[in-house]
Image: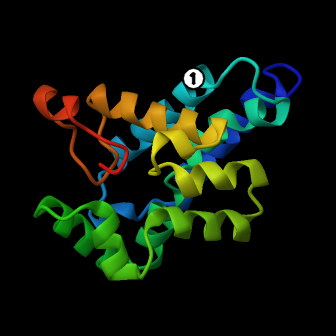
């Protein structure tokens, strides 16, 4: 910890926990390689995009917020891989991910993400970013706004999120937070 620093240590531990906790996600139809690239890229970009004058606790939580913003999706897929497989199939047939999740689980991954965050003792500042990262940009806290913007940039870079395959250049131009 002294050699690499507490922040970097937290990032490495967080990444290792996510990787080892969800080894069976392929059963749910998720592309784990895309998902892994997506959350790490989102974490790094969230740190970069956060306003420089953000509060110290918010700045400290930025990488973790980006890394964990879709934790509800992972929790749902781990809870019932077959049901989440139907979410993936529905999405690929034209239904929005959020609608397919509501249909299969009664809530979408943002709500389930906060439930998982509370159960796991994830720091409170992260809950808003997990819950609100699909909301309209003008209503978001600085941390949720940074996560939302990071997800949009990562998607436009052509990195899929495990459910959605990377969009073509033309498709990426018109994406919204709900997408």
Quarter of the image with the N terminus is: top right
Q: Position of residue 44 (x, y in %)?
A: 56, 27
Q: Quadrant of residue 3?
A: top right
Q: Nearer the viewer, residue 4 or 66?
A: 66
Q: Nearer the viewer, residue 53 or 112?
A: 53
Q: Is residue 147 left or right of residue 172?
A: right
Extreme residue toward the right, this view: 2
Kind of element beneath mark 1: helix
- Residue 123 can be seen in this image: no
Q: Position of residue 128 (x, y in %)?
A: 65, 53
Q: Position of residue 172 (x, y in %)?
A: 21, 32
Decide: few, some or many residues near mark 1? Use Cα within 10 Å; few <14, some 14-19, many ≥20.
some
The residue at 47%/31% (across/down) is: 150
Q: Position of residue 92 (x, y in %)?
A: 14, 59
Q: Kindly identify which residue carries mark 1.
A: 49
The residue at 50%/48% (across/down) is: 133
Q: Is residue 175 left or right of residue 93?
A: right
Q: Is residue 82 left or right of residue 13?
A: left
The residue at 42%/37% (across/down) is: 151
């Amino acid at each position: 910890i002294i050699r690499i620093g507490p922040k970097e240590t937290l990032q490495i531990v967080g990444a290792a926990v996510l990787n080892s906790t969800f080894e069976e996600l392929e059963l749910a139809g998720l592309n784990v390689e895309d998902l892994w690239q997506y959350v790490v890229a989102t974490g790094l970009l969230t740190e970069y995009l956060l306003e420089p004058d953000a509060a110290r606790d918010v700045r400290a939580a930025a990488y973790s917020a980006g890394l964990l913003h879709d934790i509800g999706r992972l929790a749902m897929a781990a809870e019932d891989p077959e049901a989440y497989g139907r979410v993936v199939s529905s999405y690929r047939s034209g239904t929005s991910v959020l609608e397919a999740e509501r249909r299969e689980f009664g809530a979408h991954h943002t709500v389930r993400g906060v439930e998982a965050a509370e159960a796991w003792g994830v720091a409170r500042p992260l809950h808003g970013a997990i819950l609100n990262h699909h909301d309209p940009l003008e209503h978001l806290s600085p941390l949720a706004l940074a996560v939302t913007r990071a997800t949009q940039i990562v998607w436009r870079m052509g990195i899929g999120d495990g459910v959605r395959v990377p969009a073509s250049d033309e498709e990426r131009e018109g994406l919204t937070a709900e997408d």
